[in-house]
Amino acid sequence: MSRSFDAIVVGAGQAGPPLAGRLTGAGMKVALIERKLFGGTCVNTGCMPTKALVASAYAAHLARRGADYGVVVDAPVGIDMKRVKARADKVTLDARSGVENWLRGMDGLTVIEGHARFVGPDAVEVDGERLGSSRIFLNVGGRAAVPEMPGVHDVEFLTNTSILGLDSVPEHLVIVGGSYIGLEFGQMFRRFGARVTIVEKGPRLIAREDEDVSAAIRGILEGEGIAVRTSAECISFAPRPDGIAVGVDCGSGDPEVVGSHVLLAVGRRPNTDDLGLDAAGVETDERGYIRVDDRLATNVPGIWAMGDCNGRGAFTHTAYNDFEIIAANLLDGGDRRVSSRIPGYALYIDPPLGRVGMSETEARKAGRSILLSTRPMTRVGRAVEKGETQGFMKVVADAESRRILGAAILGTGGDEAIHGIVDMMNADAPYPVLQWAVPIHPTVSELIPTVLGDLRPAK
């Protein structure tokens, strides 16, 4: 049995569904294949459930600080983890249902549930049925990586997916991995009442960031009682009667940490190993990511890859932009390219870190003549008024072109305020244009022109 379509989309993450909408809107007969949950990582195990949990953790933290604001809370703040989980589950279920209902009601689209595998460069097979098309788009996402560390398969560990199933607060959560996922879960569960230890192999947290950003974030987390163990060169695992022992072998401190639960947050891997890519001749790199060109086409004509599986971005917004690039080039006569994308992202601890473009370290390594400006959040009126003054702003600009190269805003509202910089960089305008803007008071964003006015040659 076989069927033919004008286009086949494999995966219902952040890129696949809107692309299906554009293709069917152009009059194409399209099949969308999803093997598990509609909405992909963001909806089911990423942004939406985790940020719902972050919101609950923030509410608990703010309630405990009530006295700082003159608010009297008579009883100790407690956590009903079952209700916390139920709230996050509802956020996910509502979003997932919305995506699925939209797709199933889309004219010209056939929704197929099952596992797609290539049987040739222009066909996939799902449950014994062959589906053919001259255009195939892959949006298959990724999953948690589980490296071969000593003893890892001898213990029960959590990943960013399975930890969402907890309906009670761990006594002591040990997190292996001091990057974005690990830090968000660490602060979250600390605020829910767990003891938390973060174990990082490298010498500092979130190593891709500048050292001052990394140090400030470590200070924020340790200020809330989170233990941070860096330079853990020999991480290992072993079962114990009272939990799970994590060997860290750091230069100082106990060589072993025993926790009731262990979360592995040591990176992601693409869902490409069971797609039958060899049958289509699609090339992958040494980590399993599908190789794509600047327009997201693979080495096989008629096959494209979008989202986490192509290694060109690990965020919901980059996956959606992948869809926009392909749709513009295929349907609108455009010439959009991944290389034109200015990378931006956020770390959703509290306060959040908003980031865009090059870090100071990256700019220096590139040999740029840079201008630099920083401002502590203690000098931001909005932060003072909210009683949330941790963090700082930093902007890096090119001294010759007067273009902004990048920025970091670690502070209340930093994930929103950074967009003023994002917009300027995308407009490719010199920084004085934004310096002379008249922003609204009192906001975090109003300090951006002031920071730009303080740009000075970096030492």
Image (tube, rainbow, N blue to C red):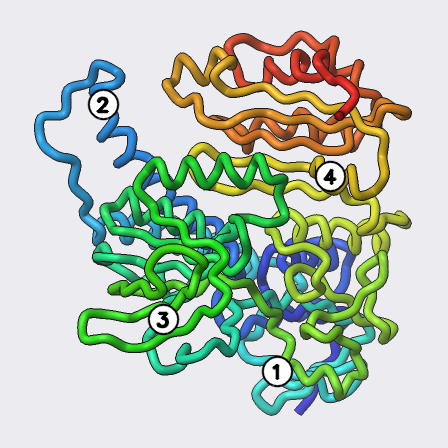
Residue 132 is left or right of residue 337, and the answer is left
Q: CA distance from mark 2 to mark 4?
A: 38 Å
Amino acid, disc 3: Phe
Residue that label 3 marks: 157
The mark closer to the camera, 1 or 2, is 2
Instruction: Find disc 2 in the rendering and name its residue.
Output: 66
At x 51% / y 60%, what residue is drawn? 201
Mark 2 / mark 3, whichever is N-terminal: 2
Q: Quadrant of residue 446?
A: top right
Cα–Cα span, label 1 and label 3: 24 Å
Instruction: Using the rendered view, name the quadrant where residue 120 is placed.
Output: bottom right
What amino acid is at disc 1? Asp
Mark 1 or 2 closer to N-term? Answer: 2
Q: Earlier in the sequence, mark 2 or mark 4?
A: 2
Q: Nearer the viewer, mark 1 or mark 4?
A: 4
User: Dot 3: few (<14), some (14–19), or many (≥20) neighbours within 10 Å?
Assistant: some
Residue drawn where x is 75% and y is 81% of the image: 132
The residue under the point 23% across, 46% down is: 193
C-alpha distance separating marks 2 and 3: 35 Å
Task: Please provide percent x and percent y for residue 197.
Answer: 34, 54
The residue identified by callout 4 is 358
Along the polypeptide, which appears first: circle 4 or circle 3? 3
Contact, CB < 8 Å: mark 1 with mark 4?
A: no
Q: Quadrant of the C terminus?
A: top right
Q: Earlier in the sequence, mark 1 or mark 4?
A: 1
